[in-house]
Image (cartoon, rainbow, N blue to C red):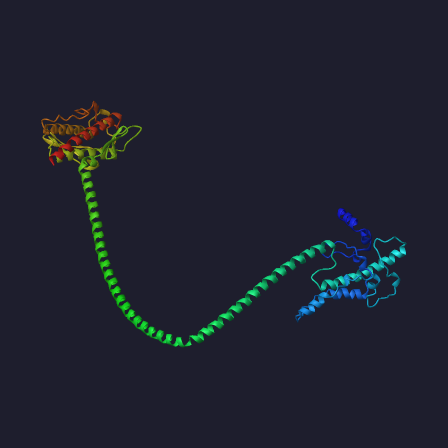
Amino acid sequence: MKKFREILKRHLPNFDKHCEMGDDDVLKCQNCQVPLEIDSSLIDLSLAQRSLLMNTATEPSVPTEIIPPDRLRRLDSVKKGSSLNLQPSVLNNLDSYVFLGGESSTLQQLRWDGESGDEADDNVTSKTLSSRVSTLTNIFNVLSSKSNIDYPVCQDCCDLLIQKLKGEYEEALKERDTYSDFLHRLKKQQELERHDTSETSIDLESGGVDTKKEQEELLQELIELEKKEAELDSTIEDLERELQAKKDQDMAELEAMNSRDFEKLEFMRELQSLKNQYESTLNNLDKLRKTNVYNETFRISHDGPFGTINGMRLGGLDDKPVPWQEINGALGQVILLLATICARLKLKLNGYILRPMGSFSKIEKFDLKTQEWQSFDAFSDGSFKLGRFFHKETSFDRAMVSILEVISQITSRLSVERSSDSEEIELPYNMHGDKINGMVVKLCGNKPALEWTTACKFILTNCKWLLAFSSSMIDDVQ
């Protein structure tokens, strides 16, 4: 702000005096709001000069009538007042009248940069300047209301306005040239149209007679064309009927062909389904032929120290006790296996009859001394018996020994019935009396132990081998 004031002081010598006068006594540019220095010619204005300024500010009216060219030439030949060498006194006396007021003594040429006087003269000067400024403000307001420019303006803003007006003037000239060119082309076009219309009218008058003949010829041609059109319409209808019949025939043939193809497709699907069923049946038949029914019926395996048949353990340990119901079921499966082998191979046991009855199976033995059949229970309930202390043989122990003897009989009979070229059947564990591989199969009323469990496991192993040999012989018999 200080730099701006210094610049104003440099360009406006009386800037400090303006600041002392106040904002109401200073004229500012209406664009940039910079204080203006009033020219001396604007301070002492007469009424005539004021009215001249305000009248010249009005917008020029557009003339309603066109001035003739000769009068314009006369107006241009008149010399302007600025070109005349008149004395200043004469120019000052051109005013129509002079305004005289009560303070005519103060109407003298004032300069803001004038000489300094005493305080009374300064007060009078300030009052005079204030009245002049207010008068100029009113004049500028009137001028602003009658034009598009807000007065007063500084020199820089005035230059900018002049450049802007010059640009608008050039644009107006270009627009005027454009309109004039368009008007010139429009006039030429109108002249050409008038010329064409005149020529066509002449041609129409000369060719009026020929048009009647041509009209009659065209009428005859039109009648002939209508007849041809009717014939073509009838021909088109016949062709459309034939085309529709052809379409119907093609559609019927397509439907018949589609139905045949559909039946053929259904037949192929059914045939393929039957082939798949036939192949599946053959595969199942091959599986069944390869399947050993006896191996599937009697699955002999082991579970740690226990031998198992169809998932039931045969034996027992102190740390892994097996309930007697499971042991009885396993022994029933062993007796059923031996009875099945004898029945399929039509073997008759010597002195033994097997009674497979599930968990309550029995074995009958013929006693040569008494000539009676004795029945041994191949099951037990694990109840306490006094014979345990005396190692007395129980019915369960005799049944276990009978199982060993039956296995030995079946093995010997199979060895005899095999062909002479075949080798004798040998089981993996040797059986003699009440022992198998040197281990006793009797419990004598005691709880199952490791030795008896191992002996039972050896019995199931021999049964598995016996089942394999008998299965091959059964297939040969079939």
Q: Position of residue 179 (x, y in %)?
A: 59, 64
Does the image show residue 363? no
Residue placed furthest toward the top = 438
Q: Position of residue 363 (x, y in %)?
A: 16, 33
Residue placed furthest toward the front = 206
Q: Nearer the viewer, residue 93 or 334?
A: 93
Does the image show residue 49? yes
Q: Residue at x 83, y 58 (%)?
A: 129
Quadrant assignment for the C terminus: top left
Q: Nearer the viewer, residue 156 or 403?
A: 156
The part of the image, by quadrant, that contains residue 396 is top left
Q: Residue at x 72, y 65 (%)?
A: 77
Q: Residue at x 35, y 74 (%)?
A: 217
| Residue 86 sits above or below residue 398 on the image | below
Q: Position of residue 52 (x, y in %)?
A: 77, 65
Q: Nearer the viewer, residue 244 or 322?
A: 244
Total number of numbered discs in the rendering? 0
Left or right, 349 with respect to 381, comes to: left
Q: Position of residue 137 (x, y in %)?
A: 77, 61
Left or right, 146 with respect to 247, comes to: right
The part of the image, by quadrant, that contains residue 27 is bottom right
The part of the image, by quadrant, that contains residue 320 is top left
Left or right, 400 with respect to 136, comes to: left
Left or right, 461 with respect to 72, comes to: left
| Residue 290 sits above or below residue 112 on the image | above
